Amino acid sequence: MDPADALAELLSPSGRVNPYPVYELLRAHGPVTSAGPVFFVATGYEEVDAILRDPRFGVLDDALRDQFLPGWRESPAVLSISRSMLRTNPPDHSRMRRLAAGAFTPRRIAAMRDVVVAQADELIDGMLARGRDGDPVDFMDDFAYPLPVGVICALLGVPTADRGLFRRWAGELTGVLEPEISPAELAMADRGATELRDYFTELVAARRRTPTDDLTSALVQAHETGGARLSGDELLANLVVLLVAGFETTTNLLGNGLVVLLQHPREAAALREHPEFAPGYVDELLRYDSPVQLTSRLSTESSRHGGVDLPAGSWLMLSLGAANRDPRRYPEPERFDPWRPQIHPLSFGAGPHYCLGAGLARLEAQVAFPQLLRRLPGLALAGEPERRVRLTLRGYATLPVTVGDPAPEP
Ligand code: HEM
C-alpha cells in the first residue's frame, strides 16, 4: 500500500483502534518514508531515537502553527499546551525543563512509593467490595484512572476532594494531541483547557498566599524568584501539562498492561511470585503496547536519516509504537517477553523532551501490577475490553474484569 494511503488508514477509526498492522505497511517502505510533500513517517527504532536526539529537529513552533493551524491563538487548548515545555524549543524549553526538573526531584519521586502502595491498596479494597458477588467491575474506572490521578494530585498538592474533576477535563484537552481533530473535538478540548486553567489559577493564588512543600508551590516559587524565571502563562501551562501527562498516559499503561498480563497467565504467575521482576515486566509492557504511540518533529536544517534526505522544513511523524516493534531491534516483536535483554522502549521518547515523569510512571506500574496480582489472584477479563478511538494516547475506554476471591491474608 502507498505510504499516503497507509497513513489515511492509520488515521481511520479502525487504524486508531489497532495501528499495528498499518505500521507494518509503512515499515515495508523503509524505516523513514515520504508520505506527502515535506511530510515523512519514521517507524524504525534507530531512526526515531536518532531524530529525537538530533538538534536539527524541534517541536511544532508558533510559525508552523500559524501556517497549518490558522486561528490557533484563539484556542485555549492549543495555546495552553504551546506554552508548556512539551511544545517549546531551546532556549525556552531548556529554561522551563531545568526549573521543573529542579522541582521534580528523584527524592520527591522516591518519597511517593508509600503513597502509591497505600492508594493501590485502597483501590483494590474498593474493587473487592464492588466485585464481591462476581459482578464485573471496570478496571479503568476503579483503578487505572484513580491511581495516577491520586498520585499526581498528591505531588502537585491538589486537594483530594477535587480529584474527580480532572478526568473529563483532561480527556477533552488531550484531543489536541491527535494528528487530526474535528471542530467539535477542538471545541471540547478548549472547554477542558479553560476549566483546567481556571482551576490552576486558583490553586496558584492559594499557594502564593500560603506555600506548602508541594510541586505547585515549588513552581510558583520558580515563577516569583528572579533569574531564570517562569512567566505566569508558562507556569499555568506547565501545571496543566504535568497534570494531564501525569495521568492520561499512566492510566493507559495500567489498562494496556493489565490486559497483556491477563492474556499471558504464565508470565503473570511469575510476576506474582517474584515482584522483584517488575522493572523488566513494566519495560516490556511499555514496549509491547505503548501508551503514547507517536510524537512529531519539524526539521530546521536538512539532514539524512534512514537513507532518506529530509529537507529543512520537513514535518515528521515519529511512530514510537512502530519503533517499539521494529524487528531489527526486537526479535519477534509481536511476542510479549519480559525476559528480553536491554529493552529500552521508546515509549517515553528520547533526547531533550524525554519524559520528565518516566520515573514516577515506572514506579506506579512496578508497584501496581505485582500488588494487583498478589491480592487478586483470580482477576480475569469479563468480556471484551473496549478501545478508545485515539491514536496518540492509546488505551481502553472500558475494561471489565471480575476480581475473584481475595488472596488469604499472609
Ligand atoms: C514528555 C510519555 C508519564 C510528564 C513525554 C514524552 C513522552 C511521554 C513520549 C515526550 C514527548 C515528545 O518528545 O514529544 C509518557 C508515558 C507515560 C508518561 C508513556 C506513562 C506511562 C508521565 C508522568 C508525568 C509526565 C507521570 C508527570 C508527572 C511529562 C512531561 C513531559 C513528558 C512534563 C514533557 C517533557 C519535555 O518536553 O521536556 N512523556 N509519559 N509523563 N512527560 Fe511523560
Image (spheres, rainbow, N blue to C red):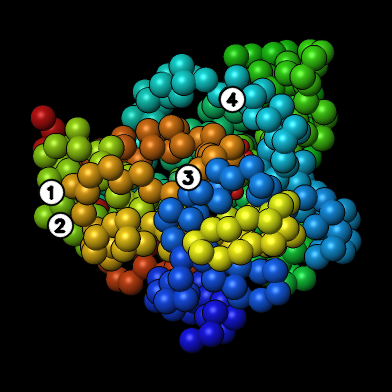
CB within 8 Å, label 4 to label 3: no
Q: Depth check: 329 or 170 in front?
A: 329
Residue 173 image-quadrant placement:
bottom right
CB within 8 Å, label 1 to label 2: yes
In the picture, measured across the screen, residue 66 lies left or right of residue 297, that is right
- Labels 1 and 3: the sequence-earlier one: 1
Q: Tag 4's secondary structure? A: helix
Residue 367 image-quadrant placement:
top left
User: Is residue 189 in view?
Assistant: no
Instruction: Name the residue type under label 4.
Output: Ala
Q: From this view, report whether residue 244 is shown above or below residue 181.
A: above
Instruction: Name the residue type under label 3.
Output: Phe
Looking at the rendering, the quadrant in which ligand 1 lies is top right
Q: Tag 1's secondary structure? A: helix
CB within 8 Å, label 2 to label 4: no
Query: Separation of disc 3 and disc 2 at Cα?
Result: 27 Å
Give the number of the mark in front: 1 or 3: 3
- Labels 1 and 4: the sequence-earlier one: 4
Instruction: Name the residue type under label 1.
Output: Ala
Label at residue 265: 2
Mark 1 — residue?
A: 269
Q: Depth check: 305 or 256 in front?
A: 305
User: Is residue 314 in view?
Assistant: yes
Q: From this view, report whether residue 380 is shown above or below residue 1.
A: above
Label at residue 348: 3
Query: Separation of disc 1 and disc 2 at Cα?
Result: 6 Å
Q: Residue at x 82, y 51 (%)?
A: 62
